[in-house]
Image: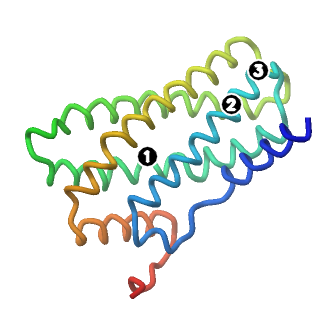
């Protein structure tokens, strides 16, 4: 029991703590760190489904993440990472199809994320419908993260230029209301 409580505490800490601001100078690393947080989100949603009841503490943490960070992450990818990667990718990379699929998934994720937040705001325990939503959202998100981590991120590291990364990092910082200091030497 103590081990489960410790795992839960660590997952909540990971979900709550944004990557360090300095990591915005390395935007691909920042995005990758956000992917880890999204995996923690999936694990916590699965835990609520397994427990079969709404957990007020988990609900609160998940809502904060969804409202504060989830949408920003999608914007980081759709407004900066994906367009810049498409500019730099070669035809043989096949990125047009990959990015189109990921953007389509983002569209459905936004709808599920809205419904998920509505479910977490309700004081009563979760119905089967909401449990299915949570399980589906977590499964879809995991599959999405696999594609991004295995295909998009390695190709971005290969194709994007330092100026591309600097611009992406600046835009990500602006979305978060952060003024980036000069690149550390």
In the image, which disc is placed on residue 74?
1
The N terminus appears in which quarter of the rendering? top right
Q: Nearer the viewer, residue 100 or 110?
A: 100
Q: Residue at x 57, y 43 (%)?
A: 38
Q: Nearer the viewer, mark 2 or mark 1?
A: 2
Instruction: Residue 163 in the image: state x and y as whole percent.
Output: 23, 72
Q: Nearer the viewer, residue 160 or 178?
A: 160
In the image, which disc is placed on residue 50?
3
The span from disc 3 to disc 1 (Cα, nearest Å) is: 27 Å
Is the C-beta separation of discs 3 and 1 under 8 Å? no
The span from disc 2 to disc 3 (Cα, nearest Å) is: 9 Å
Position above or below: 52 against 149 = above
Q: Residues within 10 Å of mark 3 (few under 14, many from 20)?
A: few
Q: Residue at x 33, y 35 (%)?
A: 103
34 horizontally vs 172: left or right: right
Residue that protrudes farthest toward the top in the picture: 128
In the image, which disc is placed on residue 45?
2
Answer with mark 3 or mark 1, whichever residue precedes in sequence.
Answer: 3
Position above or below: 100 against 162 = above
Instruction: Residue 36 in the image: state x and y as whole percent.
Output: 55, 47
Q: Residue at x 21, y 31 (%)?
A: 97
């Amino acid at each position: 029991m103590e081990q489960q409580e410790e795992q839960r505490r660590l997952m909540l800490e990971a979900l709550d703590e944004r990557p360090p601001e300095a990591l915005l100078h390395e935007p691909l690393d920042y995005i990758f760190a956000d992917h880890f947080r999204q995996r923690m989100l999936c694990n916590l949603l699965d835990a609520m489904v397994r427990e079969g009841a709404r957990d007020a503490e988990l609900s609160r943490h998940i809502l904060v993440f969804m409202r504060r960070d989830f949408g920003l992450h999608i914007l980081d990818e759709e407004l900066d990472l994906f367009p810049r990667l498409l500019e730099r990718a070669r035809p043989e990379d096949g990125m047009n199809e990959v990015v189109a699929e990921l953007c389509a998934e983002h569209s459905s994720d936004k709808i599920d994320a809205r419904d998920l937040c509505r479910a977490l705001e309700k004081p009563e325990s979760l119905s089967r419908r909401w449990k299915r939503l949570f399980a589906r959202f977590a499964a879809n998100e995991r599959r999405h993260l696999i594609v991004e981590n295995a295909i998009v991120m390695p190709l971005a590291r290969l194709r994007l230029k330092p100026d591309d990364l600097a611009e992406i990092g600046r835009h990500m910082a602006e979305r978060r209301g952060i003024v980036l200091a000069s690149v550390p030497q």
